[in-house]
Amino acid sequence: MIQRRAFTLIEAIIAILILGVAMPSMLTALATAHRNRVTPIKTSQARWLAMERLEDVIADRASPERGWSYLVPGNYPVETTLPNAPGFARSTAIFETGPDLVTPGEGYMKIAVTVSWVDELDTPLAVTLTTVLTERPE
């Protein structure tokens, strides 16, 4: 007589219980991994958008038509929506300072560009890039 070995009802119930306990945590881990994969991509895109604005400001400073006097906050308004980057907002802060780069003064311009967005969990995130320009004699 040949004996056949198969799952018993108890073994099947235990397997279902183990899967039932493990599945929610596995699904949570997958969702977290997906979110953590998306965040660096958006952060990189935000850095690129901030650098793009900094390059615009630097080009305006070097332009004979615009120059140092053009670097005022009114010429770089807040962008609540960016045409090629939906979901991102960009703002530019410009402060004229002295040589210590802290106190008000003349000759140095601190430019800070902040790009902000909201992630999948509705958490506001932002990237800020800063540079300093000097007023060189014409």
Image (cartoon, rainbow, N blue to C red):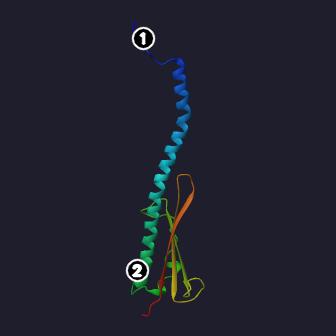
> Element under label 1?
loop
The CA distance from mark 2 to mark 1 is 84 Å
Mark on residue 100? none
Residue 5 drawn at (x, y percent): 44, 15
Q: In this view, does 69 lie above or below 33?
A: below
Classify residue 104 as left or right of residue 4: right
- Front: mark 2 or 1: 1
Q: Name the residue under label 1.
A: 3
Q: Is residue 121 above or below residue 57?
A: above
Classify residue 18 as left or right of residue 51: right
Q: Mark 2 points at which residue?
A: 59
Residue sitting at x 57%, y 56%: 123
Q: In this view, does 74 lie above or below 122?
A: below
Q: Residues within 10 Å of mark 1 (few under 14, many from 20)?
A: few
Residue 89 drawn at (x, y percent): 51, 65
Q: What residue type is labelled 1?
A: Gln
